[in-house]
Amino acid sequence: MSDSQSVSAAVAKLYNTYPFPPEPLLDEPPPGYNWRWNWLAAYNFCTGQKPQKQDIRILDAGCGTGVGTEYLVHLNSQASVVGIDLSAGALAVAQERCQRSGANRVEFHHLSIYDVEQLPGEFDLINCVGVLHHLPDPIRGIQALAKKLAPGGIMHIFVYGELGRWEIQLMQKAIALLQGDKRGDYRDGVQVGRKIFSSLPENNRIVKYEKQRWAMENQRDECFADMYVHPQEVDYNIDTLFELIDASGLEFVGFSNPGFWQLDRLLGKAPELIERAENLSERQLYRLIELLDPEVTHYEFFLGRPPLAKADWSSDDKLLSAIPELNPCIDGFPSQCIFNYDYQIVNLSTAEFEFMQACNGQATVGEILANVQLSLDGVRTLIKQQLVMLT
Ligand SMILES: C[S@@+](CC[C@H](N)C(=O)[O-])C[C@H]1O[C@@H](n2cnc3c(N)ncnc32)[C@H](O)[C@@H]1O
């Protein structure tokens, strides 16, 4: 067995012992939405417009127990979905989860990301959440996935960040030392880890961090094991993250938690510093933000395969003839107080509310504005907030 094969075998063994994530199985579709798994909302986020087709193919690479996969099926009513994973145990749970909630446009394959070429055809949306950082060779993994992304398609990725996981790394190493020869016995690892936490002084830094950030989810052994006794983990910083992205040959579209990556949030009180930062490249700016706010436990972002047509609605004529529709990921509408795609509360003005009520997928912006007292910039604000999307 090569090193890479033995690491993959160890990873599969972990997830066979502790299938992840351990969310309960339901007999109905899962509640709410995660906009990153809704093709319309995700595509609109990436390009500023509604995609042309909805009968797409989606790959959930490293689907685990299928929590994301199930959403991908239910949130995309015309899509066909494929889930792959290295762990047969996790896949069995994923299969049952989808069966029980009626998510039937899905097939699962016991397949490594390295071998994804064995699947026929290409995918319009690839979701790979919490997986690449567990591969012995993440670059080989992302390159294999990139080859399966259709032109104009998008890929959503989530990988760990090193700055916000420092205490976790220390604990991982401590457990490994105490496990000695028993490394690879994941139940023993969980037991050792829990014993350490219950023995350390209460004001210990690692204990405090665990309590503050993770204790709730780590009550479940599956989560504790995933965090502290993993046989393979690579954590990134902005520099190494972009090495991974560059190696994929795909275009970096943007972080899917854009609010975090705003320098104003940190240095808003010092316009002269913000001005200095204008000389930085995009990557240097991201690096600056993470250096000043080293809470980054993960990076989540979209990559795209060109050509990915980005819409520009600055021309009045173009905007007037566009057809607006509501973003499928909003909650509470019709009401002037709604949740946006990211579950943030938005208060709509009466004119904005009336505009949104008139969005029926047929009328153009110009036709709607003939009856609603909203300016074109008012419409642009709705677009910027991603409450409506345009064709
Ligand atoms: C932390 S879980 C994430 C599961 C799921 N994506 C989610 O976010 O809920 C990581 C999963 O990746 C799978 N995995 C690890 N290496 C893989 C590989 N080379 N190919 C396919 N799946 C892999 C593991 O078996 C495990 O189920």
Image (spheres, rainbow, N blue to C red):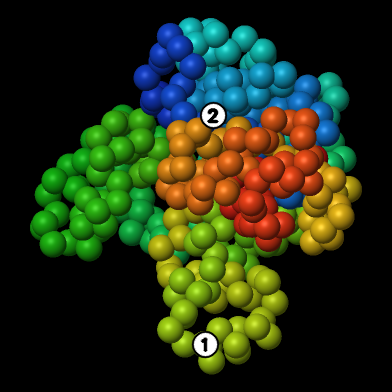
Q: Are marks 1 and 2 in contact (CB under 8 Å)?
A: no
The part of the image, by quadrant, that contains residue 108 is: top right
Identified by mark 1, the residue type is: Pro
The part of the image, by quadrant, that contains residue 287 is: bottom right
Task: Provide residue 73's location: percent of width, then percent of height.
Answer: 61, 20
CA distance for labels 1 and 2? 41 Å
Quarter the N terminus occupies: top right
Dot 1 falls on a residue whose secondary structure is helix
Q: Earlier in the sequence, mark 1 or mark 2?
A: 2
- On screen, 353 above or below 270? above
> Ligand 1 within 8 A of label 2's CB?
yes
- On screen, 389 above or below 293? above
Task: Provide residue 330's location: percent of width, then percent of height.
Answer: 53, 37
1 vs 2, front mark: 1
**Is residue 255 shown left or right of residue 251?**
left
**Residue placed at 50% from the left, 62% from the top?**
260
**Residue placed at 44% from the left, 24% from the top?**
31
Dot 2 falls on a residue whose secondary structure is helix
Q: Taking the image as four quarters, which one is ligand 1 found in?
A: top right
Identified by mark 2, the residue type is: Gly
- On screen, 266 above or below 123? below
**Residue placed at 54% from the left, 53% from the top?**
257
**Is residue 289 shown left or right of residue 53?**
left
Instruction: State the mark number for residue 153.
Output: none
The part of the image, by quadrant, that contains residue 278 is: bottom right
Q: Which residue is mark 2?
A: 68
**Residue placed at 46% from the left, 60% from the top?**
296
Quarter the C terminus occupies: top right
> Ligand 1 within 8 A of label 1's CB?
no
Quick one: label 1, few (<14), some, or many (20+) residues within 10 Å?
few
Q: Which residue is mark 1?
A: 271
